[in-house]
Image (cartoon, helix red, strand yellow):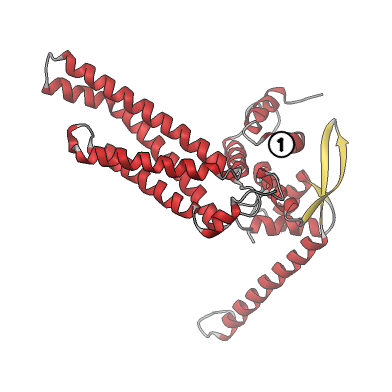
């Protein structure tokens, strides 16, 4: 899973959000390292919708403009949980090895 | 009230690059996000935002119908590569036209007939390559949209290209510059590879007539 996809799913894990909200949340989650742009975001959202990982939650009109909220589907939650577990397992192994390796410097 | 009328108009022009159905569903929403991200008194889209929108549009248009096998994905990528090679050839022909004229003038001073022949030859090349690019892009579009007959047309095009290339090589450098032959050979090899990929068993099953579960821009091209 690409990092942008992972971060979008993570942003939606806490509840439904609109596009601008997702961009801000992804920046916050990644410590300002990943700044999604609209083209990237909506291409990813379109793909995630078609893969059944994300769905439109509701639509609003704010200041005369359409605002669409997205949410994770049950499949999206499962997929995100699996990816998070995979990343956590990898990180655990890396950190354990660094602790046990005398040259690692973390012990 | 719209605070950014010029910016909105320019963003809409960029969004026009996306497939129509995607635009119908998402344009107003994307525009709202783009304008929400705009700085005070901004009138033009930034370079990064423009590049991102164009890249997104290209990715949307490259998506294939349904869930295509890897062979079809590879063939489509080869088709785009072939169009790019031909475009590079056309640009090279246009850029180097002056050099050809000067070389002929040096070799045959005062011989206007030779210049005329060169002009006709170059014009033929321009038209031939431009038509080639158009045909390739149409074939790629048809293949992306699951048109089985496009495979046959590509195979026929490969046959014509083979004859043309063999003819050029048989005549040596009398009618073709080495760069022409190299560009032709590169395009031919790409066409051959794409044709092979399109006639594998998995590709044939993909292009077999039948309903597709999703519309073209809704398929998945890459992996997540």
Q: Quadrant of the N terminus of chain B?
A: top right
A15 horizontally vs B170: left or right: right
Query: Can you see residue B80?
Result: no
Look at mark 1 in the image and give the residue it sits on: B21
**Is A41 or B96 nearer to us in this picture?**
B96
User: In x, y percent, where is residue A28?
Assistant: 73, 54
B181 horizontally vs A13: left or right: left
User: In x, y percent, where is residue B147?
Assistant: 58, 43
Q: Quadrant of the C terminus of chain B?
A: bottom right
B145 lies above or below A29: above
Q: Secondary structure at mark 1?
A: helix
**Is B31 or A33 nearer to us in this picture?**
B31
Chain identity of mark 1: B
User: In x, y percent, where is residue A98?
Assistant: 57, 80
The picture quadrant where one finds residue A86 is: bottom right
Q: At x 46% / y 48%, what residue is drawn?
A: B78
Q: At x 76% / y 57%, what residue is drawn?
A: A53
Mark 1 is surrounded, within 10 Å at the Cα level, by few (under 14), some (14 to 19) or many (20 or more) other residues, namely: few
**Is B163 or B31 nearer to us in this picture?**
B163
User: In x, y percent, where is residue A61?
Assistant: 87, 35
B210 lies above or below B8: below
B107 horizontally vs B144: left or right: left
The picture quadrant where one finds residue B184 is: top left
Q: At x 23% / y 41%, what residue is drawn?
A: B169
Query: Can you see residue A95?
Result: yes
């Amino acid at each position: 899973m690409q990092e942008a996809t992972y971060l979008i799913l993570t942003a939606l894990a806490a509840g439904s959000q609109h596009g601008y909200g997702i961009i801000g949340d992804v920046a916050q989650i990644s410590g300002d390292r990943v700044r999604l742009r609209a083209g990237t975001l909506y291409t990813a959202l379109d793909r995630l919708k078609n893969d059944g990982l994300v769905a439109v939650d509701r639509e609003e009109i704010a200041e005369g403009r359409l605002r669409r909220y997205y949410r994770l589907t049950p499949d999206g939650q499962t997929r995100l949980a699996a990816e998070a577990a995979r990343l956590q397992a990898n990180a655990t192994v890396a950190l354990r090895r660094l602790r046990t390796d005398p040259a690692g410097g973390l012990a | 009230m719209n605070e950014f009328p010029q910016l909105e108009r320019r963003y809409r022009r960029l969004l026009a690059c996306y497939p129509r159905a995607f635009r119908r569903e998402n344009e107003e929403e994307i525009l709202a996000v783009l304008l929400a991200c705009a700085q005070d008194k901004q009138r033009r889209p930034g370079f990064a935002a423009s590049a991102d929108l164009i890249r997104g549009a290209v990715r949307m248009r490259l998506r294939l119908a349904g869930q295509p096998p890897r062979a079809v994905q590879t063939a489509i990528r080869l088709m785009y590569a072939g169009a790019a090679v031909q475009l590079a050839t056309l640009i090279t022909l246009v850029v180097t036209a002056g050099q050809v004229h000067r070389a002929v003038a040096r070799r045959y001073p005062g011989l206007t007939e030779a210049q005329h022949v060169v002009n006709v030859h170059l014009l033929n090349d321009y038209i031939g390559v431009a038509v080639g690019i158009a045909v390739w892009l149409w074939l790629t579009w048809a293949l992306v949209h699951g048109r089985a007959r496009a495979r046959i047309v590509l195979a026929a095009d490969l046959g014509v290209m083979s004859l043309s290339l063999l003819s050029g090589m048989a005549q040596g450098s009398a009618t073709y510059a080495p760069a022409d032959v190299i560009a032709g050979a590169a395009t031919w090899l790409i066409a051959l590879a794409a044709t092979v990929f399109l006639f594998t068993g998995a590709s044939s099953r993909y292009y077999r007539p039948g309903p597709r579960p999703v519309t073209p821009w809704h398929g998945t091209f890459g992996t997540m």
